[in-house]
Image: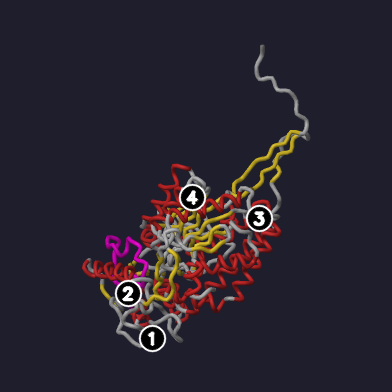
Amino acid sequence: MADSTELQARGTIHVGGEWRSAVSGATREILDPADATPFVVVAEGDEKDTDLAVEAARRAFDGGQGEWPLTPVAERAALLRRVADLLVRDREELGLLESRDAGKTLEEGRVDIDCVADAFRYFADLVAAEAPGRVVDAGSPDIHSVVVHEPVGVCALITPWNYPLLQASWKIAPALAAGNTFVVKPSEITPLTTIALIELLVEAGLPAGVANIVTGPGHSVGARLSEHPDVDLVSFTGGLISGTKVAQAAAPTVKKVALELGGKNPNVVFADACATDEGFDTAVDQALNAAFIHSGQVCSAGARLIVEESLRDRFVAELARRAQRIRLGRGTADGVECGPLVSEQQRAKVEAYVESALKEGAVLRSGGKRPAPSEERPESGYFYEPTLLDHCHRDMRVVREEVFGPVLTVETFRTEDEAVALANDTEYGLAGAVWTADAGRARRVAGRLRHGTVWINDFHPYLPQAEWGGFGKSGVGRELGPAGLAEYRESKHVYQNLAPKPVRWFTG
């Protein structure tokens, strides 16, 4: 990864195999959320830069440099595996960069890089092992009929600020495996590891023009990508409002659209899951992980604890005790368990939600304020204490809306039906979990939850082999698994008549 001086000198926009500055010459300072100081300067692209990037991707797809769509599958898979090896090589550097850019702990950054490498390897193996096509029996020896898969074309990949490299890999790896070219737009506040990934793709031997990146804001770069007539697919991960705008912009050209728009995810805990000391400790520990990993800035965060009423007092008391012990600080500091929020704007949003919840009757059990500054927690950093709000109900904004911060709300239920009703009472439907020692109940409740991913007696694990998507306002389309590869393809039915004969549709 180039240092800050080199990045500014060469530019962070990659178009047609060349690094460049923005056409306008504009730049943006990237701030370290732990102390609010700038540490890198990147190019601030706009519509003109976007048009140049799409043109380069179009040219590369339609038979220009490298002819990536015509590259044999084995060669495409081999390149993805080389990228995975380079990610492993640069794990420490990339993990540190992710920590400084997004505010997460260094350990979280390292785990992210491992997951990114896994994604590249998975899609390499998946595409390499596929059959060349599905034969369709046409009922005649003279007819050869087969369904084959082809790349979609030019893909616009718009990624969020909370998991910059991981979310980029979920789009880039299958797009390349399927033979597409792309333009990626990372979040303007956390672009650094995506820039580094483009460097690794170049190092691995990807032909010029296949991978393009434009660093810049959503209102210009993202909007132009979504509406551009030469873009065939747009994949967006982010908030509901922005995702709606992407869908509207893509509609006139009828692009393929994949949207992952967040969630308000229930974590349902039945009392029988905590019948033993070990079960109780595990459920509490996972409730903390579900809510406070990466300061709650996770689309699948278990921000809604829905706990059986008989268990509530004991469970909430232990949650509050442990939440108060979470060590906040700069993500690169030893022993830190939770880093800052990504920006002052994000912290102000969290503070507003907590304030409204308290006015609406929620009871504060822990957190609810900015922590006292310390050597590892500068006053200028965007820190906020892990916050537990008890006695919450569905009419509260903090329960209905996605906070995207370290805030956990508590609701209670008495019956299984009530638990399911509460868990499904949301506009979103991304993920959820159920905790119980009763195997039958686990299957019943999991089957009734209207969420794209349901965990049983666990929270947050994902597998590259498993599909990731949601119901309701959590979005459309799928990432990961075979369906994730399918998003970046078109299906074609090839029908070949080996003994053509005249066809007389009309008489006379």
In depth, the one of 341 and 404 nearer the eye is 341
Magenta residues, start to end = 384-408
Among the 4 quarters of the image, the one containing residue 401: bottom left
Pointer 2 and pointer 1: residues touching (CB < 8 Å)? no
Q: Is residue 431 visible?
A: no
| As drawn, 198 above or below 240 | below
Q: How far across and down, in percent of the image, does residue 112 sit?
A: 52, 72
Element marked by disc 1:
loop
Q: Compute the Cα span from label 3 to label 4.
A: 26 Å
Pointer 2 and pointer 3: residues touching (CB < 8 Å)? no
Q: How far across and down, in percent of the image, does residue 329 sit?
A: 39, 82
Instruction: Name the kind of residue labelled 3 in the image.
Output: Gly
User: Dot 2: few (<14), some (14–19), or many (≥20) neighbours within 10 Å?
Assistant: many
In depth, the one of 48 and 487 nearer the eye is 48
**For this view, does 253 lie left or right of residue 60?**
left
Given this view, does label 3 or label 4 mark the residue nearer the observer? 3
Looking at the image, which residue is at 67% across and 59% down? Answer: 76
Q: Compute the Cα span from label 1 to label 4.
A: 43 Å
Looking at the image, tell me whether mark 2 or mark 3 is earlier in sequence order: 3
Instruction: Name the kind of residue labelled 1 in the image.
Output: Glu
What residue is shown with label 4?
257
Q: How far across and down, in percent of the image, does residue 290 sit?
A: 43, 71
Q: Compute the Cα span from label 1 to label 3.
A: 49 Å
What residue is shown with label 1?
376
Label disc, if present, on residue 66 of the rendered structure: 3
Looking at the image, which residue is at 28% across and 76% down? Answer: 368
In depth, the one of 477 and 150 nearer the eye is 150
Label disc, if present, on residue 456 of the rendered structure: none
